[in-house]
Each structure stands twice: as C-alpha cells, then as structure tokens.
Image (tube, coloured by chain):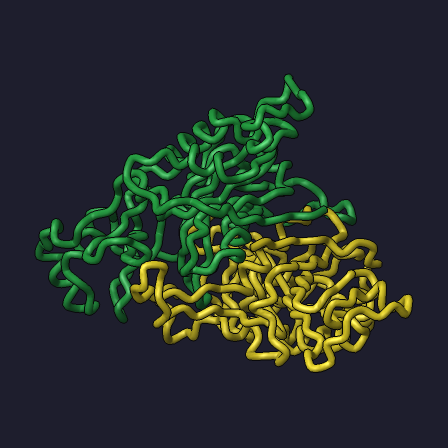
Chain colours: A green, B yellow
Amino acid sequence: MELRAIGVEGLPEIEEGMALGELIAARAELRNGDVLVISQKIVSKAEGRVRRLSSAIPGAEARKLAAVLGKDPALVELILDESKEVLRAERGVLITETHHGFVCANAGIDTSNLPEEGTACLLPEDPDASARRIRAEIIGAGGGEPGVDLSRQKRGVSGEAHPRLPPTVALVIADSFGRAWRLGQSEVAIGCSGLQALDDWRGRNDAHGRELEATQIAVADEAAAAADLIRAKDSRTPAVVLRGLDRFVTSEDGPGAAALRRPAQEDLFR
Amino acid sequence: MELRAIGVEGLPEIEEGMALGELIAARAELRNGDVLVISQKIVSKAEGRVRRLSSAIPGAEARKLAAVLGKDPALVELILDESKEVLRAERGVLITETHHGFVCANAGIDTSNLPEEGTACLLPEDPDASARRIRAEIIGAGGGEPGVDLSRQKRGVSGEAHPRLPPTVALVIADSFGRAWRLGQSEVAIGCSGLQALDDWRGRNDAHGRELEATQIAVADEAAAAADLIRAKDSRTPAVVLRGLDRFVTSEDGPGAAALRRPAQEDLFR
C-alpha cells in the first residue's frame, strides 16, 4: 500500500468570489479516488470572511479579556462574535468553542497570510457546506473522472471509460489546531465532503481475530496532517492532493467533518 | 514537493528480544532522509513490555476505579502502575498522565493485537531511548546510506559516494491517542530520534513578509498520522517509510518526542 501527497502549484492569490474548485481542478491532475486537502484560509478568502479589525467595535467583555490577555480588543471582539462559549482565557491564550462547535484558540481567527494589514480571517461559516460546494465545482470541472486526469481531458484525449463509476474525489478543508496536552499544532479537518471522516473499527477484529477495543480512526484529521507535511507555512501551496486513500472516498457527500466534533456532553475536558 | 508513504512488508510476529532495527532494515529499501514510522506495539513487544493480567494484584484504588468504570481490576492496576496521576475516571474512560508525561486513555495500555489471551501491552519504558536504539540499529545495518538503498548495498552494488554526509534516517514510534474535543483517535509520536519533532515558525515571516503568529508545527505527530493512513488496524504493517521529509531529518538524535509534551504547569486542560 502506498500514499502520495502532491502539492498543487500555481494557484493565484485568492480573492472573494473566486471559484476555488475550478481554479484547483485546472491545476491539479486529479484522478478518481483522490483526496484534495485545501487550507481553510483560501476558502475563507474566497467566501469573503476577511474582516477589517477597525470594523469591530469592542464591547465590555472584549475590552476586559483583551486587557487580561494582552490582545487587541478589536480582535477579541471578532473572536467573541464567532464563539458560543469561552473555555479558557489565561496566559495570553483564548480558547473558545465556535458557533460550529470547534474548540480552538481564538475561534480559529488569525491575521497571518493576508494581503492587507489590519485584517483578520474568520473560519468559513459552514465548512462542511463549503467542502460540498467546492467538491461539486471540482467534479463539475471534470476533476476525478475515472482514470482520466483533467489535463488530458482538457486536451480532448479520453482515458478508459468507466461509465458506471461516478467521478469521485473527496475534499477536506484543513486548519491548524493546538492540542490540550501536546505542544505544537497539527492540521485537522474542519470541513469535508465525499470522505469517510471517521473509520470505525469497533466490533471488528484484530490480526489475531480478537475484538479491537474502542478504535475509531480520525481519517479526515490524519489526511489534513499528512497534507500539511509537504507545505511550508510561508509557501503558496494551499492545496495538496492525497492519492491512495480511495477506500475512504465516497460518492455521497456524507456527514462531513461534523462527525469529528465531540459533543459537549461527552467531553471530559472543558 | 511530494511525500510518499510506503508500507514495510514481511515483518514477522515480533517477540521479546528481537532486534527491530535489523529486521526493518532488511525489509525496507531505506534511503538517506527517510523517516521510518513504527508502531508502539512492536517496540513494546520487542522490549518485553507485555504483561499477564493475572500477574497484576489489584489494590484498593484499582478495585474501586474498576467498579466505577466497568473495567477489569487487574487491567486498572496495570494502568495505575504506569501512571503518575489520574486526570479523569468517568463514563467508562480512564485518562491518566503516564510516568513519561503522556496524557492518554488507560496509560497507553491495550489488549488488542497480542498473540496471547489475558495479556496487556504497556508503552515502552522510555520511547525516545527506544527510538535512539532502533535508529542506531538501522543505521548500523546500512539503512539510510546516502543514495544507496539497503537491498542494493546488500548485493554489493555501491551507489554514489557522499563520504562527508553521515547516513541519516529518522525513527518515529507512533501510538493512537484520543483527543479532548474531537472524536476518533489520531496517531502521535511517543518517541523519536533524528527528527525535528517541532518546526518552530515563531518569529519567521509569512508569504506577505509579516510575522506569523504562534506557529509551531508538530511535525513528528503529523508524520505519525500520515503513516497511519496506509495501514489498516488489522494488518501486519507496523512499519511505514515516509519519503520527502528530508528537511526535518537530523544526523543528531535530538530531543525526541519529549519536545512535544506540554509541561503540566503550562497546561490549561487538566
């Protein structure tokens, strides 16, 4: 078994309103069964989720937290707007639960890799919906047709015909999250479509025929992490193709990365 | 840029005392700059870290916790032996901090993928030391000599000579850990050697020349996650070669995966 991760080169600086799926499909030689991992930031930019800090009017809570944490009150106001609950606010760190249900620092808002000073990038409003839309764009543009890479198709060269197999590529939207007990950030899936996000082995057997203990593999998060390894944070390679994960790719959109959010009532660490 | 993950096939069932590095070097076509990810379980087996449950005499605390959690008292006794602190014990889940400083379920002990019934596998005593030893065995067996894969070397075919470059492969010992706020498990590095476990971008600039916010990438954990994607949990592929991460591979052993443990006093979620 082999997995390959290949960077998609040549994407332009992404601006609001751009059709990400089409831009990517034109540059990636996608094949059926590929998983395309793209950074949250390009999705947010395309969706117009960049805000001027000067547009945020800090309320009393934001001013108070900003003073305690040494943060910009306007940024804290944006963070609170995107959050339903503040979990921790100490030592310069603000951990919240977002309206989507993600637990992360600063509600996932950051100010790096943006062309304009004084702006901040919010997470997409509904990353699973974004993933479904971008995936549909890619498939609509011809990406992922069985055995045919898009560049060949564009030249009018047809590959093998598999008329009964629907074209399937999966789409993951990834962002860097910190972890409770470990240093460093790892990319996780905040949205996905066409991917079995969680591989549930409970009730299946191990190599010795004995039942495995609670084992659910966070496939979408591991895919996001794998993709991160081939791009440096200062590079403009915000899209990576993973080839070799066909067994997790589905023709249906599926439940998305929502399947990876631990419900608050089952969470022992809040 | 491209990353490849390739399973190492044909390893035997691992037993106490086996020289893992030699077994792997003989089966993997390792090249300079490769990162070899191996499962915790084969390391523990080789180090004789498998215990009979019948050998553990449950004390009062173990009996009490076992009753609350619905677990085997002998298993809970083993878990407590391996832990310095119990963080959570509710809803059938026992989260502890191990003597190494890892926060995980059941002190990393599990009973799957073991040949004998009634046994449990503990984490290695010092996974970074294990990683250093296995790496030395691999390099000693000729794995990772610059530009020469081991199978060619064994046939006496010499590759290009790079006498000033030391042979370098990195070694990661991976295990599946749950996460506080997300469902499913992801593989993380519990030990490593010859790898820059944490890529620290703080103070470096983004693509627009602006300073990045706190960005430390948990490279060793992302490598562990990437390797996990190519093996099914019931398969006997406990070793995976990652090719394309040369920039994180070091000739020195380095600080290991200890660099990824968040110190208790900096931890907001205990």
Q: Residue furthest right?
A: B155
Relative to A91, is B130 on the left or the right?
Answer: right
Q: How many tags in the picture?
A: 0
- Residue at the spot 58% in from the left edge and 79% down from the top edge: B254
Examine the rendered structure and indicate whether residue A223 appears above or below residue B129: above
Is residue B68 visible in this depiction of the protein? no
Q: Residue furthest top?
A: A163
Examine the rendered structure and indicate whether residue B8 appears above or below residue A157: below
- Residue at the spot 14% in from the left edge and 67% down from the top edge: A67
Relative to B205, is A52 on the left or the right?
Answer: left
Is residue A148 visible in this depiction of the protein? yes
Image coordinates for residue B122, horizontal then vertical, percent: 66, 66
Image coordinates for residue B108, horizontal then vertical, percent: 60, 63
Of A34 and A26, which appears nearest the observer?
A: A26
- Residue at the spot 59% in from the left edge and 71% down from the top edge: B195
Examine the rendered structure and indicate whether residue B119 appears above or below residue A14: below
Relative to A62, is A42 on the left or the right?
Answer: right
Of A55 and A28, which appears nearest the observer?
A: A28
| Among the 4 quarters of the image, the one containing residue A68 | bottom left
Q: Residue furthest front?
A: A155
- Residue at the spot 43% in from the left edge and 49% down from the top edge: A238
| Among the 4 quarters of the image, the one containing residue B36 | bottom right
Q: Quadrant of the C terminus of chain A?
A: bottom left
Examine the rendered structure and indicate whether residue A71 appears above or below residue B265: above
Image coordinates for residue A128, horizontal then vertical, percent: 40, 36
